[in-house]
Image: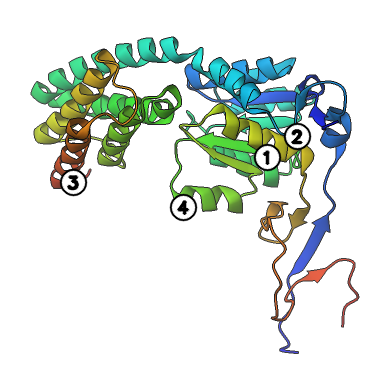
């Protein structure tokens, strides 16, 4: 018997000013069984919802009116008034060039999906967020999911110091 | 020891509430969807195809009219560039999703051409207009996929034209 995901147990917030794009994501989530799916066009409205109710996963566009998706992410992860610094965020955007991906990653994005997208790619990002949660890393310059997806052997000195490690 | 202060790192264990709440063996969708399930899911995405075509068709018409006016009236150029930038982004974003990757290609060329531009010269507006006309032809003729060699040659020609008239950028 294979493992399943019950999407009715998860609440979603879609932040996208493009009505058709938001509709596609809404339809997909609804088909998967999600019951709680909120849609807004602006981050300001997203914050209002985040302060009022529990949201488990955010799917946001980068290009938004007013505050853009990246500033939204930055506020979520780093602002002292953030309603939830740990909420998983999927960036779904047509800003798909490498430097956009790197920038989003360095501000704490959980998953990145380039538009145009298909159902399979969206589903795989949802599965990843739900079934493979990552460590969060907190440093002076970064707060967000661990950016390393793979464990790669490293021969150099460890330059980090964790709170658990005794100091020399 | 180099004497340099080591950066402090706090490693916070993964939050597993979502997994605990949603993953089970009885209800919902398989983590690994079967091909036929994926096909069904893709059909859900395609439900919005008609809305996309209507919306883009409407925006193309409006943008084209605005460009034609802006070619003659410099006061409208800023608005025309903004409108065309929005159109380029929206088309680039969703064309490929609805099996119009050629539309995405041309829209991307237009988006790059208009990037970091708040206004445009008469010739630059004409270049934007040619992109819009090309997208309109794809839409009107329902050219799905990447089209034939003619369409590909047109796409390359538009990109070259955009490169040629990229300056000034203001």
- Same chain under badges 4 and 1? The reply is yes
Which residue does the image show at 71% across and 72% down from the upper left? A153
Residue B163, which numbered label? 3
- Specify whether disc 2 shares its chain with disc 3: no
Which residue lies most toward the bottom here? B1
Q: Is residue B88 left or right of residue A135?
A: left
Q: Residues within 10 Å of mark 3 (few under 14, many from 20)?
A: few
Residue hosting label 2: A83
Query: What residue is shown at x 33% (from left), y 25% (from top)?
Result: B87
Whether the residues at callouts 2 and 1 have beta carbons within 8 Å, the answer is yes
User: Nearest the camera: A161 or A155?
Assistant: A155
Q: Which mark is residue A99?
A: 4
Left-right relation of B143 to B10: left
Q: B108 or B3: nearer the eye?
A: B108
Q: Nearer the viewer, residue A133 or B78?
A: A133
Assign the N terminus of chain A to one quadrant of the image: top right
Seen in the picture, residue A153 relative to B42 is either above or below; the reply is below
Q: Which of the two discs, 4 and 1, labels the residue nearer the N terminus?
A: 1
Q: Which residue is mark 1?
A: A76
Q: Residue at x 21, y 31 (%)?
A: B151
Crowdedness near tag 4: few (<14), some (14–19) or many (≥20) residues, C-alpha within 10 Å: few
| Of the two numbered discs 4 and 2 in the rendering, the one whose residue sits closer to the viewer | 4
| Residue B28, placed above or below residue A155 | above
Question: Quarter-wise, where is residue A120 in the image?
Answer: top right
* Crowd band around label 2 with a 10 angstrom C-alpha radius: few (<14), some (14–19), many (20+): many
Q: Do the residues indicated by labels 1 and 3 lie within the same chain of the protein?
A: no
Q: Circles 4 and 2: CB distance less than 8 Å?
A: no
């Amino acid at each position: 018997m294979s493992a399943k995901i019950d999407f009715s147990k998860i609440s979603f917030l879609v932040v996208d000013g493009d009505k058709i794009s938001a509709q596609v994501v809404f339809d997909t989530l609804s088909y998967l069984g999600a019951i709680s799916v909120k849609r807004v066009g602006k981050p300001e409205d997203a914050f209002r919802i985040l302060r009022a109710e529990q949201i488990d996963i955010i799917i946001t566009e980068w290009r938004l009116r007013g505050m853009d998706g990246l500033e939204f992410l930055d506020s979520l992860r780093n602002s002292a008034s953030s309603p939830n610094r740990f909420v998983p965020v999927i960036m779904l955007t047509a800003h798909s060039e490498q430097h956009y991906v790197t920038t989003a990653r360095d501000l704490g994005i959980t998953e990145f999906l380039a538009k145009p997208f298909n159902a399979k790619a969206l589903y795989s990002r949802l599965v990843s967020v739900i079934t493979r949660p990552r460590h969060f890393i907190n440093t002076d310059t970064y707060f967000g999911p661990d950016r390393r997806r793979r464990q790669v052997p490293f021969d150099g000195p460890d330059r980090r110091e964790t709170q658990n490690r005794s100091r020399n | 020891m180099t004497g340099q202060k080591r950066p402090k790192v706090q490693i916070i264990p993964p939050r597993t509430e979502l997994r605990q709440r949603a993953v089970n063996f009885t209800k919902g969708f398989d983590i690994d969807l079967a091909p036929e399930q994926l096909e069904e899911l893709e059909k859900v995405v395609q439900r919005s195809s008609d809305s996309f075509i209507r919306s883009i068709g409407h925006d193309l018409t409006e943008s084209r009219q605005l460009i034609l006016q802006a070619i003659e009236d410099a006061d409208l150029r800023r608005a025309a560039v903004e409108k065309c930038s929005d159109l380029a982004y929206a088309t680039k974003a969703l064309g490929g999703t609805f099996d119009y990757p050629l539309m995405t290609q041309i829209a991307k060329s237009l988006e790059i051409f208009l990037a970091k531009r708040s206004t445009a010269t008469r010739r630059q507006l004409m270049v934007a207009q040619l992109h819009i006309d090309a997208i309109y032809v794809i839409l009107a003729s329902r050219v799905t996929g990447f089209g034939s060699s003619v369409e590909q040659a047109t796409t390359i020609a538009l990109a070259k034209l955009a490169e040629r008239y990229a300056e000034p950028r203001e």
